[in-house]
């Protein structure tokens, strides 16, 4: 065994994981400015063109149910290399697609391959960084996730302006995903390690002791780049001298079927449902708006693909503000409250940071819907979309860090089921974009969105009051 990793190695590992999650969203929303061009090229309806975004979003979540448990079985490094390679191949497939069905198939595989990036990011943060820094690094991971959405639309609009054939958008993405695959292959080490159980939770510890709980990943440079280091580590444990009961325990813990099933067991925890619903509704309404904008802004305001893509410039500002509110601000808030409470920490302190998003969310939704339906200046719905996007950036940072703080020993399982379930929930909310708009109109539809989102965000109140007692109650559940 080598020495504990230095800061440069931790940051490089984290940066590569962030590059993956950046590209996952970059490619997901890249179709938005060119929905009309895609529909025309493949002789599809605008609704079918929208499915290229929403179905990709669905598999971007569901894939985690397979990849994250597999990463626990064979290690994170081999899974990340395999998925980044599959991501590259499916992007080339999209560029070569000659029919709508082929393109939809490529988009499904893209989502399935890239799904690991979103679920594994917070887990890698837990592997590498101090407990009291989780909010900062998870927030930064989320910032790269959301910036990918912004830049994906912007660059797609620029490329579509230069050449109306959508294939060039996927060819430039093939270059990016190819560089990701090479970076993963050459530089991303294995981060799986066995953490002592006493270091799994910081609840009830003074703030001064929280800094002492951190990842202590140890390995040499060569062994950390091995594809079998994690799996072999446990295989070597099965020696003839090992007691039968120990063998049975290890086999049970490493069973792929058990690993696949464990994420579903975390649905017993109310905090997990709270994160799924709050994250899912914010993602659903953002996906709804991004999908609709590709058709509505050209129709109402005469926007070109470049102009539609440039709407995402507002998302860049929203990303920074929202991820600051959902990342470093939550750490400062927790530190402040912990000091005021005599150094006693509980995860519910983070939930105070949900107040600003709960206030601003209805404003953003109504500005977008009312602005478009009443043909107000284009800046009105754009500001509304930016506010909605800022909410998407802040709420997950708060709620995911809250869940990690609550259930650190099963953080991988909670992040897996949260990513899969919230994407499924968001897919359900955003799938029928254009039929819903045609039936109810934008204002009435936005009113329904406000009602649904407010009901879910108000769940923060009972979670804050009863969260600690619920954790005690759910301690008896076997995971």
Image (cartoon, helix red, strand yellow):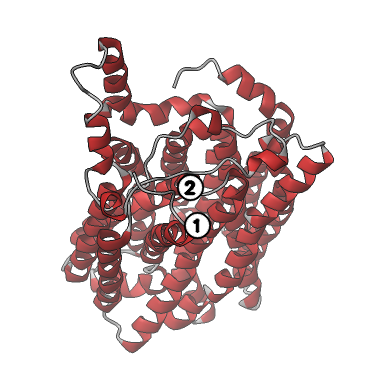
Query: SS at mark 1?
Result: helix
In the picture shown, does residue 118 fall above or below 146?
A: above
Q: Is residue 459 visible?
A: no
> Given contact means CB atoms under 8 Å apart, are the residues at marks 1 and 2 in contact?
yes
Q: Is residue 175 above or below residue 457?
A: below
Question: Looking at the rendering, which quadrant does residue 386 occupy?
Answer: bottom right
Q: Residue 173: horizontal and vertical position, in percent?
A: 30, 71
The picture places residue 461, in percent across and down from the top left corner, at: 73, 35
- Image coords of residue 430 (percent x, y): 46, 52
Identity of the residue drawn at 72% across and 45% down: 334
Q: Which mark is residue 440?
A: none
Q: Nearer the viewer, residue 192 or 273?
A: 192
Q: Which residue is mark 1?
A: 141
Q: Which residue is mark 2?
A: 122
Residue 81 lies left or right of residue 344; in this view the side is left
Q: Earlier in the sequence, mark 1 or mark 2?
A: 2
Work out whether residue 159 can be spotted.
yes
């Amino acid at each position: 065994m080598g020495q504990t990793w230095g800061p440069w190695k931790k940051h490089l590992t984290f940066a590569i994981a962030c590059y993956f999650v950046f590209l996952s969203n970059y490619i997901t929303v890249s179709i938005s400015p060119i929905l009309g061009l895609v529909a025309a090229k493949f002789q599809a309806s605008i609704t079918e063109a929208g499915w290229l975004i929403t179905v990709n979003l669905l598999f971007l979540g569901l894939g985690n149910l397979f990849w994250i448990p597999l990463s626990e079985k064979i290690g994170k490094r081999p899974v990340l290399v395999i998925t980044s390679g599959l991501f590259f191949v499916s992007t080339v497939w999209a560029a070569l697609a000659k029919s709508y069905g082929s393109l939809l198939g490529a988009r499904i595989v893209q989502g399935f391959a890239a799904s690991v990036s979103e679920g594994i990011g917070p887990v890698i943060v837990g592997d590498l960084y101090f407990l009291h820094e989780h909010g900062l690094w998870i927030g930064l991971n989320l910032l790269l996730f959301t910036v990918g959405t912004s830049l994906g639309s912007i660059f797609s609009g620029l490329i579509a302006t230069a050449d109306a054939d959508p294939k060039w958008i996927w060819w430039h993405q093939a270059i990016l995903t190819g560089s990701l695959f090479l970076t993963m292959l050459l530089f991303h080490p294995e981060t799986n390690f066995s953490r002592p159980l006493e270091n799994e939770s910081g609840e009830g510890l003074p703030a001064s002791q929280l800094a002492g709980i951190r990842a202590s990943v140890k390995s040499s440079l060569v062994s950390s780049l091995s594809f079998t280091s994690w799996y072999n580590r446990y295989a070597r444990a099965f020696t003839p001298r090992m007691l039968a009961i120990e063998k049975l325990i290890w086999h049970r813990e490493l069973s792929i079927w058990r690993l696949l099933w464990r994420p579903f067991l975390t649905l017993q925890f109310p905090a997990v449902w709270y994160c799924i619903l709050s994250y899912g509704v914010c993602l659903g309404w953002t996906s709804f708006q991004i999908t609709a904008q590709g058709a509505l802004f050209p129709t109402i305001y005469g926007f070109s693909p470049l102009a539609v893509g440039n709407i995402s410039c507002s998302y860049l500002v929203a990303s920074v503000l929202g991820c600051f509110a959902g990342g470093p601000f939550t750490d400062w808030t927790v530190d402040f409250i912990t000091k005021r409470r005599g150094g006693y920490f509980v995860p519910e302190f983070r939930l105070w940071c949900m107040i600003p998003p709960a206030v601003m969310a209805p404003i953003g939704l109504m500005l977008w819907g009312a602005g478009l339906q009443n043909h107000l200046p284009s800046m009105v719905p754009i500001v509304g979309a930016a506010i909605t996007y800022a909410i998407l950036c802040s709420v997950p940072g708060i709620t995911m860090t809250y869940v990690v703080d609550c259930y650190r020993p099963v953080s991988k399982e909670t992040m897996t089921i949260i990513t899969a379930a919230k994407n499924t929930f968001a897919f359900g909310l955003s799938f029928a974009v254009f039929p819903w708009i045609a039936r109810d109109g934008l204002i009435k539809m936005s009113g329904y969105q406000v009602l649904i989102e407010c009901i879910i965000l108000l769940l923060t109140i009972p979670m804050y009051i009863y969260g600690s007692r619920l954790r005690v109650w759910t301690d008896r559940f076997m995971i």
